[in-house]
Amino acid sequence: DLARNSVRTMSPRQIRDRIVRHLERESPVKPEIPSVTFSDYRWIALRNIMIVALVVILTLPVLLPVAIIWLLVIRVLEIREKNAPARPDPPVDDRTYDVEDRGVQFHLATIGIVKENPVRRLTIRAVVGMVGIGFQRILLRGGFGGVYTLHFAHVVLLDEGRRVLLLTCYDGSALEYLGNFTDIAGAYINGAYSSVENYPACKWLLGNGASSLNGFLGWSRQHMQYTPVFYSAYPNETVLNLMKDLDLRDHLVKATSESEIERLLKLL
């Protein structure tokens, strides 16, 4: 109580100085600021976006006709596939649902069967490759398609491209997490999973699909795989909390203005 009352009489700068002294002299863990900070990733991502945009502009005369033909072929396949008989879904492992929603973070794994068509298989390879570039070069500060509950996502094509495995770690409940993609980032999911058996029907590759909440949730729940063990370096932290921690680490010592110090202290 004495320490709390003394802090109330201190200015934001004095509080900042006390925290910094504690970290430098008393804390058993010393924050290490890397050469490339979390803030730096913003400018690295912007640079990479400009490079990608330049490459697209330079190759547009070649890419545009190919993209138009490719989308037309995809649309023809979508129309034909509506009347095709659905493959039987795999049995559901009830153990998957028994271990859900027991902590801050949870792991999700799904396996889908890629449709038996060379265009579909080429499409999913291209989309998975582009999403990989996006994660590694552009989405450096999190927020996949505006979803800020996703810690990581890793997609692997198995059996020479016949199956696709998705591994993710997320915050909150499974239903809320999947609902975020329906509301915010459905087009990203459609790009890859429109080429997967029994996925909700898409239109022009990116449309519909995940926008059907019941259809997307039903497909996702049906294809989840039981995962008895998964690793998390910070199991009790959400994505947004980790982003705040990185912001504090990178700027608390360097903050000079009262407004910046007050902004950082509000993150505590």
Image: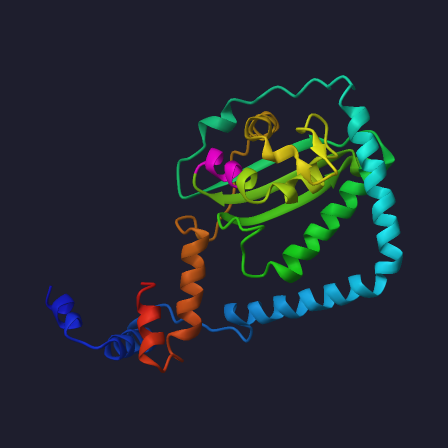
- In percent of width and height, residue 109 lies at 59, 36
The N terminus appears in which quarter of the rendering? bottom left
Taking the image as drawn, is residue 197 in sight?
A: yes
Task: Tell me the chief SS of the magenta region.
Answer: helix
- In percent of width and height, residue 149 lies at 48, 47
Q: Is residue 20 depicted above or below 164 in this figure?
A: below
Q: Which residues are magenta?
A: 173-180
| Front position in the image: 205 or 107 | 205
Q: Is residue 192 depicted above or below 222 in this figure?
A: below
Q: Residue at x 88, y 59 (%)?
A: 61
Point out the residue furthest to the bottom here. 256
The reply, left or right, for residue 223 in relation to residue 162 is: left
User: In the image, is residue 177 part of the stretch drawn in magenta?
Assistant: yes
| Front position in the image: 261 or 72 | 72
Q: Residue at x 58, y 21 (%)?
A: 92
User: In the image, is residue 108 part of the stretch drawn in magenta?
Assistant: no
Q: Residue at x 45, y 32 (%)?
A: 100
The reply, left or right, for residue 47 in relation to residue 127 is: left
- In percent of width and height, residue 262 lies at 30, 72
- In percent of width and height, residue 205 lies at 73, 39
- Count of residue discs: 0
Taking the image as drawn, is residue 110 in sight?
A: no
Q: Is residue 72 depicted above or below 198 in this figure?
A: below
The reply, left or right, for residue 20 in relation to residue 90 is: left
Q: Quadrant of residue 10?
A: bottom left
